[in-house]
Amino acid sequence: MKEKELRLLSKRILSRERYLHTLRVVALSKELALRYGADVQKAKMAAYFHDLGYFIGRSKRDRTLSHARLSENYARKLGITDSEVLEAIRLHTTGQRGMGTLAKIVYVADATEAGRNYPGVEQIRKESRRSLDRAILMIIKRTREHLHTKKKRLSRKTVQFEKKLMKRQKEAH
Ligand SMILES: [Fe+2]
Ligand SMILES: [Fe+2]
C-alpha cells in the first residue's frame, strides 16, 4: 500500500485524537528506522496500522483479542504479509522476547511520540537515540509503575521480555 492510501485509511478509521497520535508514531518510527538502519517504509506501514484495531468492529470471536492483535488481523485482511510489519503491529503494547528491530522501533515510537508527556518521557526519548533496548527497559519500568497505580500488572509476555533484555544488558557490560 502507498503511504497516501495508508494515511487516508487511518484518517477514515481513527478518531481525530488517535489519528494525530498515529501520525506522530509514523514520524518517530521513520526517524528511528533511519537511525537504526531498519526499513523506513515498513516502519511507517506498521505505525499506520498499529492502533486501527481500536476502531474496527469486534466480532464475538474477537472479543478477547487485544487491539494490537485486531490491528494485525486487519492488516492481514488488507493483504499485508510482511512478517516484520505484522510483528511490529502485534507486539506494540506488550513486546515479546526475541522481537525484531522493526517491532522495537514501533514499540518505542508509540511510547515516546511527541504527544506523550508522562514523567520521565524526556529521558526515555534521549535513551532511545542511544539504545532501543535500554529505552524499552525504561518504558517497561514506567508501564509497571503506571499499572500499579491502577492495580494492574504487566503481562507475563512483557515480564519475560524485560528479563531477557536485562540479561542481555548485563552480558554486554
Ligand atoms: Fe496501541
Ligand atoms: Fe498507539
Image (cartoon, helix red, strand yellow):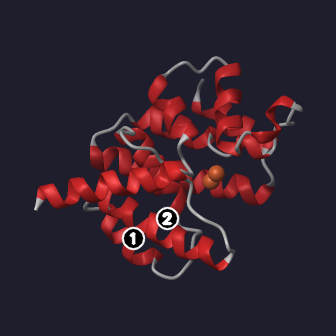
Q: Secondary structure at mark 2?
A: helix
Quarter where residue 99 is shown: top left
In the displayed structure, 54 sits above or below 142; it is above
Looking at the picture, which amino acid does disc 1 mark?
Ile
Residue under the image location 55 percent in, 18 percent down: 81
Q: Position of residue 62 (x, y in %)?
A: 80, 33
Instruction: Report the disc number at residue 112.
Output: 2
Residue 30 in sight: no
CB at disc 2 and ligand 2 closer than 8 Å: no
Please identify the residue farthest to the bottom as the structure is shown.
119
Q: Secondary structure at mark 1?
A: helix
Residue under the image location 85 percent in, 36 percent down: 58
Residue under the image location 89 percent in, 32 percent down: 60
Q: Which residue is mark 1?
A: 124
165 sits left or right of 24 in the view: left
Q: CA distance from mark 2 to mark 1?
A: 7 Å
Tell how many labels: 2
Q: Position of residue 73 (x, y in %)?
A: 68, 28
